[in-house]
Every structure is written in structure tokens, then in C-alpha cells.
Image (cartoon, grey):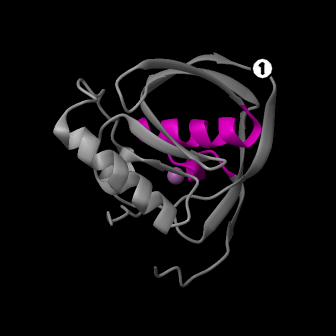
Amino acid sequence: MLKIVIHPNSILRKKSEKIKDPLSLDIQKLIPEMIKTMIAKDGVGLAAPQIGKNIRMIIVRYKDNNLVIINPKIIKKSLLKEWDEEGCLSVPGIFGDVKRCKKITIKYLDELGKEKKLSAEGLLARIIQHEIDHLDGILFIDKAKNLKIINFNNEQ
Ligand code: CO
């Protein structure tokens, strides 16, 4: 299992680079490891900087699927925004309310390097926005209000 980078760490604050070849061995090996790590940590999303790699790839759990999203770009977002509570594997024990677009459409490459488009709303849209923020060095605590500490002992 991969080790989660915990805030504060400069890796979490860097802008990550585009992946040139999604089919490269490095990336193809990393994908199942990231999925395994996300599931083991009971996360609903994981961005590559969180496992120490400043590359533009995120994994998002949606229903029973693990979406592999490479080089995502938000191409449409709703004017309508909503607040909801978020947490992050890299900021253990802290939760807070973040305002996000209710609906978004993204363009990305899947694990086979195929161009895809996805429209999402509600929780899925929120998770994707949170994970894309990671690729730009942004953490939810930068945007959150009503931050609260739930658990001091988040040793896993
Ligand atoms: Co996060």
C-alpha cells in the first residue's frame, strides 16, 4: 500500500504536471496501487500528490466503480453552488464546510488513455472538485469554514 502524504508537506502545495503517456508502465502500475490505497483508507477519492507524485491523476470512487481520471479539465460548471462537509486523507481528523459548484462537466483521459467527458452533480461533483484542487496545490482547509477536529488520534 502507498503511503499518504500528510499536511503540511510541500508536495501537497505544488502544481502537478500533465501526464504525457497514460499507458506508460509507471502509470499503469500506479493506478491499481492508488485504487488499493484509497479503498484501504476508506477514502472516496485520492489524488496523485497525496501519494507523493506531482502528476495530474485522480481516482474517484463512485458507487462501486473506481474512476481513473487523468489530466482532468473542468469545461463547464454550474453557477449554483452548495456547501457541504469535507475531509481529506492528507488532513486527518479535520472536517469543514466547503462551497463547491453543484454541477460540473470535465474532460479527461481514462486509464486506457481514451478521451472522456463526464457530467457530475452533488457528491460526485464535489469529490472531483476536491481532487482536482489537489492537483493545483489547494487543500480543502484553504476554502473551508466551520473547521472542526473530530479525532486527535488518527493513526492508521
Ligand atoms: Co483530499
Res. 71 image quadrant: top left
Point out residue 152 in the picture as x, y percentages from the top left corner.
Answer: 57, 82
Q: Is residue 113 above or below residue 99?
A: above
Point out residue 68 in the picture as x, y percentages from the top left corner.
Answer: 45, 38
Q: Is residue 34 above or below residue 116?
A: below
Point out residue 12 in the picture as x, y percentages from the top left corner.
Answer: 38, 50
Which residue position is annotated with label 1? 79
Residue at (67% x, 48% y) in the render: 63
Quadrant containing the N terminus in the rendered view: bottom left
Element at label 1? loop
Farthest-out residue, left: 25
Q: Is residue 54 above or below residue 76?
A: below
- Residue type at the position of mark 1: Leu
Apparent side of residue 24 relative to residue 6 in the rendered image (left or right):
left
Apparent side of residue 117 relative to residue 156 in the rendered image (left or right):
right
Residue at (67% x, 75% y) in the render: 150
Magenta: main secondary structure:
helix
Where are the magenta residues, as a range? 121-144
Res. 60 image quadrant: top right
The reply to whether residue 48 is in sight is yes
Point out residue 13 in the picture as x, y percentages from the top left corner.
Answer: 37, 45
Using the image as rendered, state which of residue 103 and residue 94 is in the foreground: 103
Q: Residues within 10 Å of mark 1 (few under 14, many from 20)?
A: few
